[in-house]
Image (cartoon, rainbow, N blue to C red):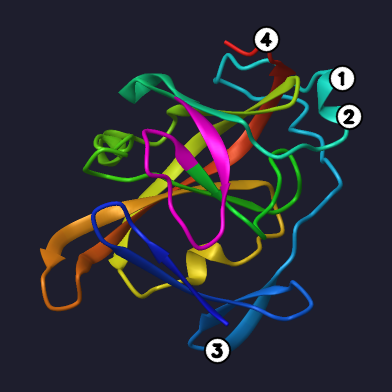
Amino acid sequence: MVLVVLGAVGVLAFREWRSPSGRIYVQTTNGRTQLQMPTALVPVPTSLPGTGMPADTPVSAKAPSPPSQLVIPRIGVNVEVFPMADQPPTTAVVGWILGSAMPGTAGNTVIYGARAGAAAVFEHLDTLTAGDEVTVAAGSVAYVYRVTSLQEVPADQTDMLLPTSTPTLTLLTDAGIWDTTAARYTKRLVVRGTYVAAQPWSGK
């Protein structure tokens, strides 16, 4: 079955397949690749020169959990995270792409947020710059990522969903202009971040 993610104001065609066994695949130019959800947490760097960020703390040794809150101080985002399969959020929250990694694991944690409409939370995602902090809370742990890159890609590009060998956060939203024929935006904004710290999370 083809899973098509319908955006609140458009169509986000991730071109995913969920097999009868429950496995999820992403179609790329090199064929289909299975999304695998890592379950082992990894330590963050023991030192982060020049960042002012503390080194890893014992909370990173806890069992991984699905993300529940996303905080991006630079653009005023503090929203709940819900699992997202074939339906995007219809309110001002973000969706964690099922099949992507849990926060703090050696993999690609992918989160989608709408750019416009009633569910818009990522209107200003394009103003982030390298070094900005993004916190993904999961259970009682806040996993902190630091933005490394922003890129606009064609709307049908899917390689940003693929697994990674290192702990990576991928934030997605619509970009470009509205294509009335295709009923979707022409591009997608991809923001990448790398894992830098694990801290206690109080739920605020």
Which residue is identified by label 3?
30
| Mark 2 or mark 4, earlier in chain | 2
Mark 1 Cα-neighbour bin, 10 Å: few <14, some 14–19, many ≥20: few
Residue 82 belongs to magenta span: yes
Q: Quadrant of residue 18?
A: bottom right
Above or below 32: residue 98: above
Q: CA distance from mark 1 to mark 4?
A: 16 Å
Q: Residue at (43%, 64%) from the top-left corner?
A: 5
- Residue under label 1, please give it: 58
Q: How far, Cα to Cα, is label 1 from label 2? A: 6 Å
In three-dimensional space, the C-alpha distance between marks 2 and 4, rounded to whole angstroms, equals: 17 Å
The location of residue 38, given as percent across then percent down, is 79, 54
Which disc is residue 61 wearing? Answer: 2
Q: Which residue is mark 4?
A: 202
The boundaries of the magenta stretch are 79-94
Label 3: state its secondary structure: loop
Mark closer to the observer (3, 4): 4
Look at the numbered disc 4 and give the secondary structure of its residue: loop
Q: Amino acid at mark 4?
A: Ser
Above or below: residue 108 compared with residue 160: above
Mark pair 3, 4: CA separation: 43 Å
- Mark 1 residue element: helix
Considering the image in quadrants, where does the N terminus appear? bottom right
Q: Are marks 1 and 2 in contact (CB under 8 Å)?
A: yes
Q: Give SS at disc 2.
A: helix
Q: Amino acid at mark 2?
A: Ala
Residues under numbered marks 1 and 4 in contact, where contact means CB atoms less than 8 Å apart: no
Does the magenta run of residues contain 182?
Answer: no
Q: Is residue 41 left or right of residue 191?
A: right
